[in-house]
Amino acid sequence: MSRIRASIDPRNCNTNVRLRTLLAIIAIGLTARIAVTVNAGLAAPFAPRSDAIEYDSYAWNLVQGRGYSGISPDVKSPTGELLEHPTAYRAPLTSVFWAGIYWLFGHRYSPVRLAQCVLDTLTILVLYRIARLCFSDVVALLTAGVYAVWPTALLYSSLPGSEPLYAFLFCWSLLLSLQFAEHPTLLRALGAGVLLGLALLTRGNAVMMVVLLIPWGVVQFRKTPWLILRACLIPFMAMLMLLPWTIRNYRVLHAFVPIETGGGDVLLGSYNRVIATDPLYYGYWVFPTSELPEYTQQITAPNDEVKRDGVEMRLAKQWILDHPEKWWYLLESRFRRSWTPFLQPKSPVLYRIGMMASWGPVLVLLILGFLPTAIYFLGTNHPGWILHIGILHFVLTALVFWGASRFRYPVEGLCIILASATLVWLYKRISSATVTVPGLSMRRPNRKSSTDLPIHSLDYYGSNDSILP
């Protein structure tokens, strides 16, 4: 009899429907990613002079036992060809991940692209879990459904690079941090730190998140000092993950390189006369040796990636000091470019339509809900404001360097969560508003609508209590 009652329990029905819906969303997401990838060329060679060429070079050398070596810009042989050499030009984890795929399947490009599709599909599940911890089942399913067919996610899943791996690791680290806040065990803190460290070894801009997690831990656990120390294990462990790579770089390159030697390209490409004057590059970046001929000789002369990086750093710092009148222009241009749904006219029409139709509405909802959700989380001591911290890490990256969709893509899932929560709240507000009948206007009778409560009410987010088994 108890089994019969359990089988018809509405809470179990809701759970079964939720699980079936989630599985359908994941299946749609994986299918869409594979379809876009196949259409773009599943086994096609990587584009010349792309990031993927460099990652491929390092990965294949790892498989062949040559260590982490390959090509980097402006390090050439006497004949002028790019020279393969021990390198730290890019953070290593993407190439290590690709090396594992090459070791299993050979030097083929299709498994790499399919692996990226799987990773980004797993990100759907991670975002669902984050949204459910912070808001409700409805918000979680809406987030998963939107991200399953999100144009930017479909695009970057099909483009070989570091973005799908970084987005997956970054979001997973946030999920584990939220779970740590719920049950602050040592194992969860260490796990969240390891994941953030792996993200840092994938893309160096995760260092912004490492720094921001310190105030998150201090504020979130301010009433329990010993938990502050445990929360600080997350950023500490993330930095500790860099130690083996840093030691390797010191032994091989004879220099202190904690993440990568490509920072000079990033910094000088972000601070120069072209960026400060050419409207085409408003808030963006240029590659130094191809767009800044006045620096080319100084950059290429060392024929060494560590020294080259140092030269670029010095030139960028000097330009910054010499042009304080451009600081505000650079900040506002990067901020605007990092958030705009408008692509440049030279972009394909389909890309421009897709960006407007997807990112445009999410951006509006994000703007409406960003502060109210942050106020709610902080006011109720809910750890969900780590979503806002995650988005802030992207904003800081854009302000310091440049605004680009590839930087925003890893946090777009977080933006979708907040936008979905805002949409659900707006729907509840509208659905509980005055019901108008010809000749009669009245409120819904016999109950106090949860949306009549202040914005801080739990129902703003939708409690899970009524539908959990």
Image (tube, rainbow, N blue to C red):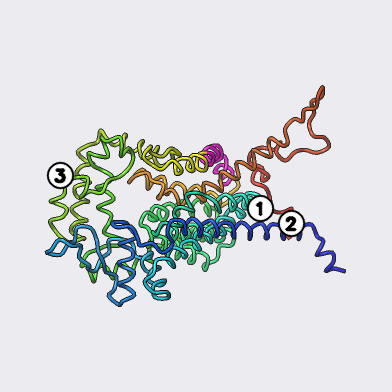
Q: Earlier in the sequence, mark 2 or mark 3?
A: 2
Q: Local crowd at mark 2 within 10 Å, few (<14), some, or many (≥20)?
A: some
Who is closer to the viewer here, 272 or 103? 103
Q: Which residue is mark 1?
A: 137
State if disc 1 and disc 2 touch (CB < 8 Å): yes
Give the number of callouts.
3
Alpha-carbon span between mark 2 and mark 1: 10 Å
Label for residue 14?
Answer: 2
At x 34% / y 69%, what residue is drawn? 59
Q: Is residue 227 left or right of residue 73?
A: right
Q: Is residue 251 above or below residue 123?
A: below
Q: Is residue 74 above or below residue 102?
A: above
Who is closer to the viewer here, 322 or 94? 94
Question: Could you tell me the amino acid type at mark 2?
Answer: Asn
Residue 364, horizontal then vertical, whole percent? 53, 37
Magenta region: which residues? 361-378
Disc 3 element: helix
Give the residue furthest to the top. 439
Alpha-carbon span between mark 2 and mark 3: 65 Å
Give the residue furthest to the right. 1
Q: Specify the principal SS of the magenta part.
A: helix
Looking at the rendering, which quadrant does residue 352 occupy? top left
Who is closer to the viewer here, 160 or 260? 160
Question: Could you tell me the amino acid type at mark 1?
Answer: Asp
